[in-house]
Image (cartoon, coloured by chain):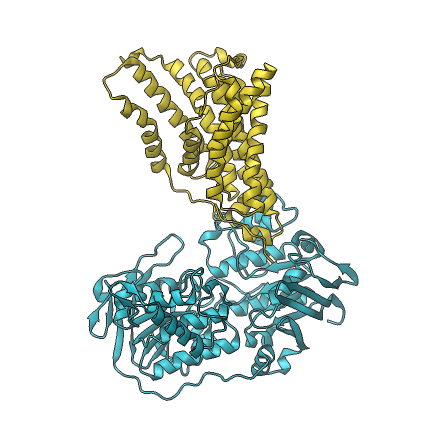
Chain colours: A cyan, B yellow
Amino acid sequence: MTDTLLKIQGLTKAYPGVVANDDVSFDIGRGEVHALLGENGAGKSTLVKMIYGLVKPDQGQMTMHDVKYAPTDPRQARATGVAMVFQHFSLFDALTVAENIALGMENPPSQRDLSDQIRKVSQNYGLPLDPRRTVGVLSAGERQRVEIIRCLLQNPKLLIMDEPTSVLTPQEVQILFQTLRKLKSEGTSILYISHKLDEIREICDTATILRHGKKVETCTPSDKSARELAEMMVGASFEAPKRSDRQLGDVILEVSNLSLNAADAYGTSLRGVTFTVRAGEVLGIGGVAGNGQDELLSALSGEAMTPASMVHLDGRDIGHLGPNDRRLLGLLAAPEERLGHAAAPNMSLVENAMMTAADRKGMVTSGFLAWGKAKQFAEDVIQKFDVRTPSAQNAARSLSGGNLQKFVIGREVLQEPSVLIVNQPTWGVDAAAAASIRQALLDLATGGAAIIVISQDLDELIEISDNFAALNEGRLSEIRPMLGLTVDQIGLMMGGAHDIEVAHG
Amino acid sequence: MIMDINPILLASAIMVASTPILLAAIGELVVERAGVLNLGVEGMMITGAVVGFIAAHETESTTLGFFGAAVGGAVVSMIFGLLTQYLLTNQVATGLALTLFGVGLSALVGQGYQATNQVPVTKMPIPLLSDIPVVGPILFRHDGVVYLSLVIVAAVFVFLSRSRAGMILRAVGENHDAAHALGYNVRRVRLMAIAFGGACAGLGGAYISLARVPQWVDNITAGTGWIALAIVVFASWKPWRLLIGAYLFGGVTALQINIQAMGLDIPVEYLSMSPYIATILVLVFLSGGRAPGSLGRIFHASS
């Protein structure tokens, strides 16, 4: 703990128009789990990219074990003992597990030796993996194992992990933590990036908080409350969403025995999903990514059609209707993927507003588009949901993730739906924006709408749901009142720890 | 009637007819596995055809002719490489432009060489093997380029499936962001792949102007490059399937020409379309592969 592994001094990196990192300094000790905290755009990823040699700092220096450390590319970083587990985009779907791992190594052994090594390490750390399988068919949790094992095979001195738990069940998270503790006891340092404050308080020895590219503080996270940490990240205090007492009304949406075959080989088929939602109710649907969430959203929104009687809205069978017909009946949806699914990246906010609100907001007269109304509506959303953008004419692509998400959710909420289905409403959104999105959903429910929130963020579901169910391999668990459910029970509903075992001694 | 066709001569002709497509297609296969869609195959082939013809004519050596064709094809492919990899132009548009450019350039350069005679390409029968009855004349009495094309296919197969460099190339084609994040030089890998594709297309083009025809006329490749592109896709980006596809196409082409020559009572148009239909049918039934994940996408190494 006492001796320093990596010393970061005054790292600065500027991009045109924005300083991503401004004079950041901190130390990572040997065998220390060091958290890097910050909102989206606070400069966390630029900082780790500099440590991993993907980005060259403008100023400042790093020393590792008192030797100057200035990697020019990731290979050099790996050779010095720095390994990184990426949040996404570092696996190759069409290649096998063994090939993926070999690509991240300097001098990989022959495929057969490598397969043996993979089996050995995966046994040791309780992360079972078959080296011959193709990565494209693996679950999110298994893909992460591939990334972790790729790093572990190089005996790293410093392991960088970018949002490692966002795809795991609570049980899987506990097993990951045991792996991390084992690594720590062996003297490996870990730089842990996350915005899940409870996790950081549980696993990390030290935390460095970044805001707008500058270091705010380095502290011991277990000394602080999650709220204090969040406020340091945001730089202001913010209101946690409040739910007001409300009476649940009549059943609005009824889904009975919904089955839907997956659209492609990597999807999940829905099997016999049955539930009802009442007016004023928030139904939270949890589960690890890839267990049928996308398919459920498309079956409910009308992107995927089913036999009519499987989906029932306000006394009508609507399973056979497409998205526009369902919108007219008051059922709206906001899918997970902001760019490309919920919004068209290269079109302006006005055009994006037109695309889902045209019918409900009367923006079409005899086949012609009423741009004035669309602009008005887009500006309404921007103002009421505090979307930060220079104007409504800016392309959706140009907004930050959080701002675009506020726009996408706001666009549906302001259309006054009777049923709203959202998938991952606050994914990759900073704490303050997430709180305001959740508040908007609760307000909508208070106004008498039925809301289905599909999310992998359990804290979010606990915060806003009245009832909870979990998706596991395309099946929906029983629905239980959120109040009184423990995290363990939720984890079991989500399918437990799948086939992971605890790290061996 | 059909009996009039000598099966041994036909089989031997099939190999000759298929070689240009095979060469161009195997080069494009490597380019596409690296994630680049170069629609300029036709342009690179015809450039190779004219450069090869001129080089062979001037030096009176077909070997030097083929060598020049490969260099010529690779040089034109670098126009495409620089535009798409450094100036980040759209690959489809740039590839189409390359084809138009190549066709025009070759017509210009080849003006003085129309209808001139060419030194013949020497056959290189393989000792002993070529004396085997039936198999010998079909497989082992060809010129060097036919053997070379088969060696290239085998080498590409081994390279892609067994070598580390090949794995890196596939990784770049599958997910260029991930490959970049792991520290691989996406641009360099792709430029090398594009140059290889250009050289192969050039060789294929020269095989038409030096061995098959052998003469220089404008637009001599007559769409062979497009067939090669289609065969890469239908072969699901797999070298052995590509070999089947190219030989099948060449085979039906050679067969239908023989049938035409016999004067069977089938309209010529049907015979002419038969190679295309046969190739598409067979490869569709074989299909099931998936395109490289980053195929045709522009890579911009941001941040």
Q: Residue at x 41, y 20 (%)?
A: B14
Quarter of the image for the N terminus of chain A: give it: bottom right
Query: x%, y% of residue A110?
Result: 60, 43
- Work out whether residue A242 or residue A21 is closer to the camera in this orientation and state it: A21
Query: x%, y% of residue A352?
Result: 39, 65
Q: To which quarter of the image does residue A196 belong?
A: bottom right
Query: x%, y% of residue B83?
Result: 55, 43
Residue most extreme to the right? A66
Q: Residue at x 61, y 16 (%)?
A: B59
- Work out whether residue B8 or residue B100 is closer to the camera in this orientation and state it: B100
Q: Residue at x 38, y 27 (%)?
A: B249
Quarter of the image for the C terminus of chain A: give it: bottom right
Residue A155 to residue A350: above or below = above
Residue B271 to residue A198: above or below = above
Query: x%, y% of residue B61?
Result: 59, 15
- Work out whether residue A425 or residue A247 is closer to the camera in this orientation and state it: A425
- Work out whether residue A135 or residue A196 is closer to the camera in this orientation and state it: A196
* Apparent side of residue B84 relative to residue A447 in the rendered image (left or right): right
Residue B154 to residue A159: above or below = above
Residue A246 to residue A71: above or below = below
Q: Is residue B244 visible?
A: yes
* Apparent side of residue B36 relative to residue A450 in the rendered image (left or right): right
* Apparent side of residue A350 relative to residue A234 in the rendered image (left or right): left
Counting labels gives 0
Q: Is residue A205 visible?
A: no
